[in-house]
Each structure stands twice: as C-alpha cells, then as structure tokens.
Amino acid sequence: MSNEQHKTDVIIIGAGPVGLFAVFELGLLDMKAHLIDILDMPGGQCAELYPEKPIYDIPAFPVISGQELTDNLMAQIKPFDPTFHLGQMAIGLTKLENENWLVETDMGTKIEAPVIVIAAGGGSFMPKKPSIPNLEEYEGKSVFYAVRKMEQFKGKNILVAGGGDSALDWTINLQPEAKSMALIHRRPEFRAAPDSVNKMQALVGANKMKLYAGNLKQLHGVNGQLEAVTVEQRGEAPYQIECDTLVAFYGLTMKLGPIAGFGLNLEQNLIPVDTEKFETSTPRIFSIGDINSYPGKLKLILSGFHEAALMAQQAFRYVYPDKKLRFQYTTSSTDLQGKLGVK
C-alpha cells in the first residue's frame, strides 16, 4: 500500500485516449493533471484490447492502430508533464471544507484537486475468464486475455479459445508467427465475421492450424508454464491438447466499480452530463467519453475529444476563479506555442 499524497488542479479518472487528450486541453489553459487508471499502462481499451488493430475514424489519420494513437497522444501531452497513477482504482471520494475533492485509490494514494474528470470509458473492464482450477498460476506467464505484442508469441505452440471476432482475428494474425496454432470453441458455429471464419477454415484445410470443439476443463504445467489442456465435449471422452500458450477471448465484463457510489445520478450505468460543459449533477465533477450520457451521444473517440475541449473551459473557471479566460488558437498564439515548446 502507498501513502502518497498529492495536490493538483485536475484529477482525471481514466487514461484512455479521451483522458489523455483532456491533459492537452487542460494544459493549454495552465492546468496540471494527475491520471488514475486500473490498467498498468496508458491508452485504455485502445492499448489493452486492440493495440495493433486499425482504427479508421480518427481525423487526419486514414488508418492508425490503437497503440499508435496512444503513443501520439502521449507525445502530444508531454509538454504538460502529467502524473500517472497506474494499476490503481479510484475507490473513495470526499468533499473537503475548501471545496476541493480528495480522491483515494485502492493503493492508498490520495490526490486533492478542485476538479475531477471521469473519463473511464465503460468503467473498469475485466476479461471474462474460463472456469478452470488454478488458472491464476498461469496468468501472465502462459495464459493471456489480450495480445499486447505479437513478438511475444513468436515460435509458441498457441491455443486460442473463443468464437468471436477477437478470437478469430488473433488466430489468423498469430498463425504465421506461431510454431503451431489451434483454435477451440465450445461449438462448431462462430459469432465472428464470415470472412474471418472463412480465412480460419482455409488455414485448417491447408493443415496450417487445428480446430477443436469443446470446453476447457484443466490446465497442465509446472510453475505457471503451460504444457497441455484437458478438453471435454458432451458425449465424448476427455482429451488433451498440447500447447505452451493459451490466449482466451471470452469477452469482457464492464464494471463501473466504485464510481457508482460517487453520487452522480447514474442512468443505466452511464453518467448524465450537460452538453455545454460536460459537467455532472455534482458541481466540479465532469464526465467525458463513453461513460457519459446526453441526448444524441455518439460513443466515438472524436466525440470524447470535443467533450474534453469544452470541459477544460469550465474547469478553468473553478481552478482560476479570479482569472479571465481568453480563447486562443494554437496556430496563431505565441503564448500557447511557448507552452507546447514550438516556435
């Protein structure tokens, strides 16, 4: 547990693309930010779920991967030197006598600020895990729920479990890197795009991978290193598949977590906001990105970027109540260009 105590201008809960861009918009207005995220790296779902999959609707980028988008945002906010509290969850919220908020994390970190911005996407998302004894022994060593770096899987005997788009996409993408590739799904039908299913079946037909139907029941290995899995299928005797790596794509559960107890008048696990400032029902607490709700809301990254810009305007008024807010363009303002370190 940590006993760290910090004071800043704005606390951002969530370090996905929208939370990261909020750092930029706040920084242009001389506001410092601390970010809290349950993941162990910035980027949110983009970096965790599809770091190498293409995104096509970011303005000025015909195509960009989730990791590239994250890297670009991190470079863009570097002049503002944000502080990250990663691998932590915001669990406590207290209103102080000086009107500031105090946020506490599950690691014991305490941060005080006049403004809070909730940019937590769908909440804290956790992978749905197969119901297998002693699964924890293997997690992070030879059992994974996402593909962060493809080279990590090079030369492995891989078993992918699942029947949706992620399972099929990564089966196809990892097959050329793997020593051997197999896919297991509980039934012969798949929920993935037909084109992906056809590509996978073509690999099976060419003896470049194997396909199994059944349920994972047991892992076999030593010190977290997988050697084989036991599979059961109704009406048939259990059998084993040899593999040294299991990548399970059973989907995600989105949990709002402790934010649900922050008193924000939730509607269907979303946070209602106004469309002028993106402020919640509680003054000085804002919500931007997929976790908020308002008439006409579109769950797009670019919508979250717009929300971050308007949020920062009102946050300035709370952080600097005695200062006048002056609107400037980065293209023409030498003041803003100085903050960004450009000429």
Image (tube, rainbow, N blue to C red):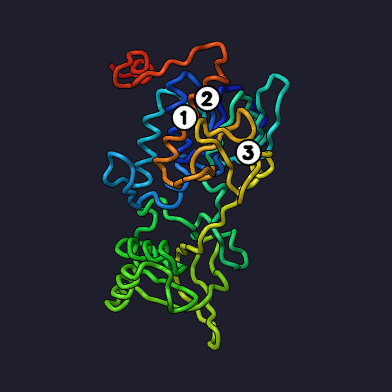
Instruction: Look at the image and tell me in which quarter the N terminus lies.
Output: top right
Mark 3 lies on residue: 90
Q: Is residue 319 left or right of residue 210?
A: right
Q: Dot 1 corresponds to which residue?
A: 310
Q: Earlier in the sequence, mark 1 or mark 3?
A: 3
- Which secondary structure lies at badge 2? helix
Residue 161, percent across and down?
47, 68
Q: Which residue is mark 2?
A: 314
User: From what the image shows, is residue 11 above or below residue 171?
Assistant: above
Q: Quadrant of residue 69?
A: top left
Give the alpha-carbon distance from disc 2 to disc 3, as whole Å.
23 Å
256 left or right of 316? right
Residue that appears at 51% across and 64% down: 250
Name the one closer to the observer, 115 or 131. Answer: 115
The Cα atoms of the two marked residues, 1 and 3, are separated by 24 Å
**Residues at circles 1 and 2 in contact by the CB criterion of under 8 Å:** yes
Image position, residue 157 (x, y; %): 40, 66
Which is more foreground, mark 2 or mark 3? 2
Disc number for residue 23: none
Image marks 1 and 3: residues in contact by CB distance under 8 Å: no
The amino acid type, in three-letter code, at marker 3 is: Ala
**Residue appearing at x 50%, y 78% in the figure:** 214
Quarter of the image for residue 262 reads top right
Looking at the rendered structure, the number of numbered marks drawn on it comes to: 3
